[in-house]
C-alpha cells in the first residue's frame, strides 16, 4: 500500500471496491464456562467511498468489531483485510505501519496530544512516518474543518467540538484508505456533534473518503450511507440511506427483543 | 480515613516501590553505620577494660604521643620503679612492662610482618597475668635473648612456624629473633602484629637500656580500691609520673580508638545525609504525582464530606506507612551493610570475627525517625496540595490540575541565589580562613537550595535550549520528548535536583582535589632540591645507621639528615615563650636540599651548630632579628640551649613541607636531648655519577629495611598524590550512592509519567507510532532531564570548587586546575545513566496494549 496507490484510488471519488472486509471474524474472551463471545463469525464488507455506521445496543460488540477491523485488537478466529492486506496475519510492527499509513482514527475523547499544537497534531501521523504532508491537500482539509485561525493553539485552548474537528483533520490529512471513528461525537453537545458529522459526511461525498463509525446515537447514524446493526456479536440487519427515525425504530426493536 | 489511606497505599504499592527503595537505602546507610561503629566501640572497650591493670604507672610528658613517635623518642620510667611500687601498701604484684610501637618486623626474605598502614606492630616483654590479652598456645615462653613469641594471626598470615628467624628493626639497630612460641588472643585481635620477648632483652632492644621500662602494671590487693592505690602510688613516686586506674587506662585507650571510629561514623553519616536529601526529592515527586493522578478521587472524598485536614492526613498517613516499611527494610539492609563492613575491616587486619554485631536501642529509634520523618517531610507539600483540591474536581474530566505560576518561586530563588553568590564571592576574596569558611559553607548551602527552588524555572528555560536540536535530530519523537520534559517543570526540576546535587558534589570535590594535586606537585617541584630522600613513616623513625650507610654508598654525594621534634618551648628576644612547639632539626646543607625562601640572614648557615632559623611572622611578632638569641627548651630532658638567629624564613602558607617550624641544628639537639632519630634523610648523587646507578646502590643497602623507601622527586610526588587519590576515590565511591538514588529518581519520575500518559501513548500507537518510536521518546526525555541536571550541577559544583580553591589558596592551595576529563565524563555519564534509567519505563511504555491504553482513565 503506497501513497501513490492511495492517491489513485482517491482520484476516483466514489471508488468502487472494498476498503475493508472480514470473514468469519470471531472474538471471544475467557475460556470454557466463562467464555464470552463478543463477535460471532461476522462477515462484513466495507465499501470504498462510503460512510458506514455500526450500531447496536451496548454490549452488542460494535466497538469490538471496529477495533478488530482496524487492527487495534486481535481476533480469536477468522480473517480481516484492509484493502488487499490481510491484517489478521500481520505482526505488530507491520500492523503499526499499516495503521500509520492506511488508517485514520477518531476516538470519542482524548484524541490529541496535549503538548502539540492543533497543526502539529494534524500532521503527527505523517511526522511519525517521516513523510512530508501534501501541502495543498492539508490546506484543503484545514479549510474544510474551518480551523485555520486555531492552528497554533494547544488542545487545552480549544473547545470539545474544535478538538474533535482537529482529530478529523488529522485522520484525513494523510489520505488514509479508511477512517475509523469510535463514537466521535459521543462527548459533544448536539450542535458541535452535528458540525463534526456534517464534516465527516462531506469528506465522504466530496473527498471520496471511506469512513466507518461506531455510534449508539440514531441521529449520528443518519449521516451515514449505510448502517449495520449488531446484536450479540452478529450483524442482524442493515439499512441504506438511513433516516434518524428509521434507525430509532430499528433500535427500539432491539430493546423490545431484550425486554420481552 | 485510616482504612482509606491503607487501601490507597496498597493499591498504589507498585508506584511506591522506588520511593521505598530510596528510604531503604538512606536508612540502611544510617543504621549500618551505627551498628558497625557500635560494634567496634564495644569490642575495643571490652578488650581495653579487661586487659587494663588495676593501676598503670608511666612517664609523664608534655609531648603528644605523635610528637614522641615522630622524633623517635620512647617514653620510659626507671626500672627500679617496680621495686619501689612493690613496697607500696596494697600492691599485690607489680609487673614491669616494656613495649614499643617504633619497630619493624621482617621475615628472612625481608618482607614486612606487620602492615604498612592501620594496626600497629608492637614489641613487648612477656609476662603473664590474669589481664593478659593473649595466651601462649604452642611452644614456650621467651626465656632468653633473641627469642620471640609471635601472635597466631601473624604466624598464619606470613606462613611462619616455630624455629623460624625474624628480624626486629628500630632506631637502635637490628636484632635477629628466633620464634619459640605462638600467642593467641583470648578475645578480639585488634589487628596488631605482636612480638613478645624476655623482659631484660626487651628492655635492651626496645628501650636501649636495662635501666628503663615503659610502664609498671600494678595488681591491687583485694579490698584496696584502684583510686586509693592510685593515690598511694602518686604519694610514693611524686611528680613526673602518670598514674592511671584501670578505668582511666581503658577510657583513654577507648578514646583513642573512639576518635577514629567517630571519624568513620560522621564521614559515613554525612553521606547518609546526602542520600537522605536526594531521597526526599524522589519521594516528593512520587507523592506529587499520586496526588495529581488521584485528583478526582480526592475531590470525591471532599464532596462526600471529608475535611481538608482529613485529606492531608490521609496522604500523610500513606507517607508514614511508606516510611515505616522503608525503614524496617532499611534496618535489615543496614545489618547486611554492617556485616559487609565488618568483613571489610577484618580483611584490613582488624579481626572482629568473634565479635557479634551490637544493636543498640538507639539504632532502630534513629533509623525509624530518619526514615519516617524524611518521608513525611517529602510528602507534606503534596499532601497540602491534595487538601486544596476542590470537591468540583470529582465532577471534572481527569487530567493534570492547572499549574500555579512560577513567579513567586523565581523571586525567592533569585534572592537566595543572589545572597549565596555574594557569600561565595566573599569567600573567594577573603584572606581570613574563619569567616571565609563560614561564607563558603553559607554560599554552598544557599546556592544549592536556590538551585533546587529555581529547578522548575531553570527546567523551563534551559531544557528547551538544550534540546533545541531534538526535532531536527530525532524527528517527531525528539520534539515530543522535548515538550514532555518541560511539561511539568516542577516535577522535572525535582527529579533533576537529585542528580544535580550528586554531580555538584563530585564536581566541587574533584576540582579541589585536582587543585590540591597540582599545588602540591608545584610545591614539590619548587622545594625538592635533593636527588633522593628516605622518609620515616608514622611509627618508624629511621635507624641512625641508615644515614651512615647511605653516606658510605658508592656515588653518594652530600647527605643531610633532618628530624621533627615536638614539645619544644621557644623563648624569643621579647620574652615571649611558645609552648609545645615543633621544630625541625637538621644539618648544614639543608637549604640546598630543601629549597625554601628566605627573607633575611644567610641561609647557608642554617643547620650549623649554635644557629636557628625562624619564620618571618614569628620574627616580626617577637622582635627576633639576625643575630638575636632564641632559648630552646626540650620537654623530654628539660634542658635549654641558646641559639643565634642566622636566617629568617619566608612565611609558609601551609600545604606541603614543614610549615613555619623553626630550624635548629641536630648537633645541639643531640647534646641537649639525646635519643631522637631521623625523620628524613636527603641525599644527592656525586657530581658526574649516574643517578640511576646511585639509586640502585642505595636501594640495595636499604634491603634490610623494607619499611623505608628510597624516593626521587617523581616517586615522592606519586606517593603524596597517591594519598590524595585514595581520599578522592573514597569520596567518589560514597557519592556513587547519591547518584544511584538520583537515578532511581529519574526511573521513578519516568515510570510514573508513563503511567500518567497511558492514553497519550495509546493514542500515538493507534495512529501509527512504532514501539521503537515510543521507546525513543521516553529515552530522549530521560537523557534531556539527566543532561540538564548534570549541566546545572556542573555549574554549581565548578563554582563551589573554584571558590573553595580561592579560599584555600591562603593555606597553600595556590594553583587552580580543572579535572576536565572527570568533568566531561560526568556529563556524558549523566546522559548515559539517564538513558539507562529510561530502559524499564520505556519498555513498559512500548509494551502497552493499545486498546486498553486508549480506554484507560
Image (cartoon, coloured by chain):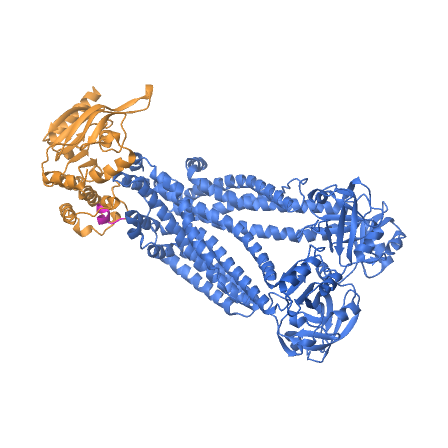
Chain colours: A orange, B blue
The answer to whether residue A121 is magenta is yes
Which residue is nearer to you in this view: B106 or B626? B106
Q: In the rendered view, tell whether residue B669 sits above or below residue B389.
A: below
Quadrant placement of the N terminus of chain A: top left
Q: Looking at the rendering, which quadrant does residue B663 occupy?
A: bottom right
Residue at 59 percent of width and 46 percent of height:
B33
| Depth check, front residue: A139 or B435 | A139
* Place of residue B337 in the rendered image (x, y in percent of width and height, measured from the top left): 57, 42
Main SS class of the magenta portion in the image: helix
Please give the count of numbered marks on the rendered protein.
Answer: 0
Q: Position of residue B129 (x, y in %)?
A: 82, 44
Q: In the image, what residue occupies the spot 18% across and 34% down?
A: A213
Q: Quadrant of the C terminus of chain A?
A: top left
> Where's residue B347, x and y in %?
63, 44
Residue A26 image position (x, y, % from top left): 25, 24
Image-based side of A218 in relation to B481, left or right: left
On the question of residue B360 being in view, the answer is yes
Q: Is residue B328 above or below residue A226?
A: below
In the image, A187: left or right of B588? left
Q: Is residue A218 visible?
A: no
In this view, which residue lies farthest toward the right?
Answer: B87
- A69 horizontally vs B579: left or right: left
Tell me where the magenta segment starts and ends, as one range.
A116-123
Q: Is residue B6 magenta?
A: no
Amino acid at each position: 500500500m503506497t501513497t501513490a496507490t492511495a492517491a489513485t484510488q482517491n482520484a476516483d471519488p466514489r471508488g468502487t471496491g472494498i476498503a475493508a472486509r472480514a470473514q468469519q471474524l470471531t472474538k471471544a474472551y475467557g475460556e470454557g464456562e466463562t467464555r464470552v463471545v463478543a463477535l460471532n463469525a461476522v462477515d462484513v464488507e466495507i465499501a470504498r467511498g462510503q460512510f458506514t455506521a455500526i450500531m447496536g445496543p451496548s454490549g452488542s460488540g460494535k466497538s469490538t468489531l471496529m477495533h478488530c477491523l482496524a487492527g487495534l485488537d486481535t481476533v480469536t478466529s477468522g480473517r480481516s483485510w484492509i484493502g488487499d492486506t490481510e491484517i489478521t496475519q500481520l505482526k505488530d510492527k507491520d500492523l503499526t505501519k499499516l495503521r500509520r499509513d492506511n488508517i485514520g482514527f477518531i476516538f470519542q475523547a482524548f484524541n490529541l496530544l496535549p503538548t502539540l499544537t492543533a497543526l502539529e497534531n494534524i500532521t503527527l501521523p505523517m511526522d511519525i512516518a517521516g513523510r512530508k504532508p501534501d501541502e495543498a491537500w492539508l490546506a484543503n482539509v484545514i479549510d474544510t474543518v474551518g480551523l485555520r485561525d486555531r492552528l497554533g493553539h494547544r488542545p487545552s485552548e480549544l473547545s470539545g467540538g474544535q478538538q474533535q474537528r482537529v482529530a478529523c483533520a488529522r485522520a484525513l490529512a494523510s489520505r488514509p484508505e479508511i477512517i475509523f471513528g469510535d463514537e466521535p461525537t459521543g462527548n459533544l453537545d448536539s450542535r458541535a456533534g452535528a458540525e463534526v458529522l456534517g464534516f465527516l459526511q462531506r469528506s465522504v461525498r466530496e473527498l471520496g473518503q471511506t469512513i466507518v463509525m461506531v455510534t449508539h446515537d440514531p441521529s449520528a447514524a443518519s449521516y451515514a450511507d449505510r448502517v449495520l446493526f449488531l446484536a450479540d456479536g452478529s450483524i442482524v440487519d442493515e439499512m441504506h440511506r438511513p433516516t434518524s427515525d428509521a434507525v430509532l425504530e430499528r433500535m427500539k426493536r432491539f430493546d423490545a427483543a431484550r425486554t420481552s | 480515613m485510616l482504612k482509606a489511606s491503607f487501601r490507597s497505599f496498597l493499591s498504589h504499592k507498585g508506584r511506591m516501590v522506588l520511593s521505598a527503595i530510596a528510604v531503604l537505602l538512606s536508612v540502611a546507610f544510617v543504621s549500618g553505620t551505627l551498628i558497625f561503629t557500635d560494634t567496634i566501640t564495644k569490642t575495643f572497650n571490652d578488650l581495653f577494660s579487661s586487659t587494663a591493670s588495676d593501676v598503670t604507672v608511666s612517664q609523664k610528658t608534655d609531648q603528644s604521643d605523635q610528637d614522641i613517635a615522630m622524633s623517635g623518642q620512647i617514653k620510659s620510667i626507671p626500672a627500679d620503679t617496680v621495686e619501689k611500687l612493690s613496697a607500696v601498701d596494697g600492691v599485690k604484684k607489680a609487673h614491669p612492662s616494656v613495649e614499643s610501637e617504633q619497630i619493624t618486623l621482617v621475615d628472612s626474605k625481608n618482607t614486612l610482618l606487620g602492615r604498612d598502614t592501620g594496626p600497629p606492630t608492637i614489641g613487648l616483654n612477656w609476662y603473664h597475668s590474669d589481664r593478659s590479652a593473649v595466651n601462649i598456645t604452642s611452644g614456650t615462653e621467651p626465656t632468653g635473648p633473641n627469642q620471640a613469641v609471635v601472635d597466631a594471626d601473624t604466624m598464619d598470615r606470613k606462613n611462619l612456624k616455630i624455629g623460624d628467624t625474624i628480624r626486629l628493626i628500630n632506631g637502635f639497630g637490628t636484632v635477629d629473633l628466633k620464634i619459640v612460641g605462638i600467642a593467641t588472643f583470648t578475645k578480639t585481635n585488634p589487628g596488631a602484629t605482636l612480638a613478645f620477648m624476655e623482659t631484660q632483652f626487651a628492655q635492651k632492644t626496645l628501650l636501649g637500656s636495662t635501666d628503663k621500662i615503659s610502664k609498671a602494671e600494678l595488681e591491687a590487693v583485694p579490698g584496696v580500691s584502684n583510686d586509693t592505690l592510685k593515690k598511694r602510688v602518686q604519694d610514693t613516686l611524686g611528680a613526673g609520673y602518670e598514674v592511671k586506674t584501670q578505668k582511666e587506662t581503658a577510657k583513654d585507650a577507648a578514646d583513642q580508638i573512639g576518635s577514629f571510629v567517630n571519624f568513620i561514623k560522621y564521614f559515613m553519616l554525612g553521606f547518609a545525609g546526602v542520600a537522605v536529601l536526594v531521597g526526599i526529592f524522589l519521594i516528593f515527586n512520587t507523592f506529587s504525582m499520586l496526588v495529581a493522578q488521584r485528583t478526582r478521587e480526592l475531590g470525591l472524598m471532599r464532596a462526600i464530606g471529608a475535611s481538608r485536614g482529613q485529606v492531608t492526613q490521609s496522604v500523610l498517613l500513606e507517607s508514614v506507612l511508606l516510611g515505616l516499611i522503608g525503614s524496617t527494610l532499611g534496618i535489615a539492609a543496614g545489618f547486611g551493610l554492617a556485616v559487609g563492613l565488618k568483613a571489610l575491616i577484618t580483611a584490613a587486619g582488624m579481626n572482629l570475627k568473634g565479635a557479634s554485631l551490637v544493636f543498640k536501642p538507639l539504632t532502630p529509634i534513629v533509623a525509624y525517625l530518619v526514615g519516617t520523618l524524611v518521608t513525611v517531610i517529602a510528602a507534606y507539600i503534596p499532601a497540602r496540595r491534595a487538601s486544596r483540591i476542590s470537591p468540583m474536581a470529582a465532577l471534572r474530566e481527569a487530567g493534570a490540575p492547572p499549574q500555579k505560576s512560577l513567579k513567586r518561586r523565581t523571586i525567592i530563588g533569585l534572592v537566595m541565589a543572589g545572597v549565596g553568590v555574594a557569600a561565595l564571592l566573599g569567600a573567594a576574596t577573603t584572606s581570613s580562613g574563619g569567616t571565609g569558611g563560614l561564607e563558603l559553607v553559607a554560599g554552598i548551602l544557599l546556592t544549592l537550595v536556590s538551585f533546587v527552588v529555581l529547578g522548575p524555572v531553570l527546567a523551563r528555560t534551559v531544557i528547551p535550549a538544550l534540546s533545541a536540536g531534538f526535532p531536527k535530530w530525532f524527528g517527531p519523537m525528539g520534539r515530543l520528548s522535548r515538550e514532555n520534559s518541560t511539561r511539568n517543570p516542577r516535577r522535572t526540576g525535582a527529579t533533576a535536583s537529585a542528580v544535580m546535587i550528586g554531580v555538584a558534589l563530585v564536581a566541587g570535590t574533584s576540582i579541589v582535589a585536582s587543585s590540591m594535586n597540582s599545588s602540591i606537585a608545584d610545591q614539590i617541584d619548587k622545594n625538592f632540591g635533593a636527588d633522593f630522600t628516605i622518609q620515616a613513616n608514622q611509627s618508624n623513625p629511621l635507624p641512625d645507621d641508615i644515614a651512615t650507610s647511605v653516606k658510605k654508598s658508592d656515588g653518594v654525594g652530600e647527605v643531610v639528615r633532618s628530624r621533627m621534634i615536638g614539645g619544644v618551648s621557644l623563648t624569643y628576644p621579647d620574652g615571649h615563650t611558645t609552648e609545645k612547639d615543633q621544630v625541625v632539626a637538621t644539618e648544614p646543607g639543608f637549604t640546598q636540599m630543601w629549597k625554601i625562601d628566605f627573607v633575611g640572614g644567610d641561609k647557608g648557615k642554617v643547620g650549623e651548630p649554635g644557629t636557628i632559623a625562624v619564620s618571618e611572622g614569628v620574627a616580626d611578632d617577637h622582635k627576633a632579628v639576625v643575630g638575636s638569641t632564641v632559648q630552646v627548651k626540650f620537654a623530654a630532658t628539660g634542658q635549654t640551649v641558646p641559639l643565634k638567629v642566622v636566617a629568617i624564613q619566608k612565611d609558609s602558607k601551609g600545604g606541603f613541607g614543614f610549615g613555619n617550624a623553626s630550624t635548629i641544628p641536630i648537633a645541639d639537639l643531640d647534646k641537649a636531648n639525646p635519643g631522637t632519630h631521623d625523620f628524613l634523610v636527603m641525599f644527592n648523587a656525586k657530581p658526574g655519577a649516574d643517578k640511576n646507578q646511585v639509586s640502585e646502590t642505595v636501594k640495595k643497602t636499604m634491603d634490610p629495611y623494607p619499611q623505608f623507601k628510597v624516593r626521587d622527586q617523581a616517586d615522592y610526588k606519586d606517593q603524596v598524590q597517591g594519598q590524595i587519590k585514595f581520599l578522592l576515590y573514597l569520596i567518589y565511591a560514597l557519592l556513587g550512592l547519591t547518584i544511584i538514588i538520583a537515578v532511581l529518581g529519574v526511573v521513578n519520575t519516568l515510570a510514573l509519567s508513563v503511567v500518567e500518559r497511558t492514553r497519550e501513548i495509546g493514542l500515538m500507537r493507534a495512529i501509527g507510532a512504532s514501539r521503537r518510536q515510543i521507546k525513543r521518546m521516553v529515552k530522549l526525555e530521560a537523557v534531556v532531564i539527566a543532561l540538564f541536571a548534570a549541566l546545572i550541577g556542573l555549574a554549581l559544583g565548578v563554582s563551589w570548587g573554584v571558590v573553595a580553591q580561592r579560599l584555600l589558596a591562603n593555606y597553600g592551595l595556590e594553583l587552580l586546575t580543572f579535572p576536565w576529563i572527570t568533568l566531561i565524563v560526568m556529563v556524558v555519564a549523566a546522559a548515559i545513566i539517564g538513558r539507562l534509567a529510561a530502559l524499564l519505563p520505556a519498555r513498559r511504555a512500548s509494551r502497552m496494549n493499545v486498546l486498553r491504553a486508549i480506554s484507560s482513565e
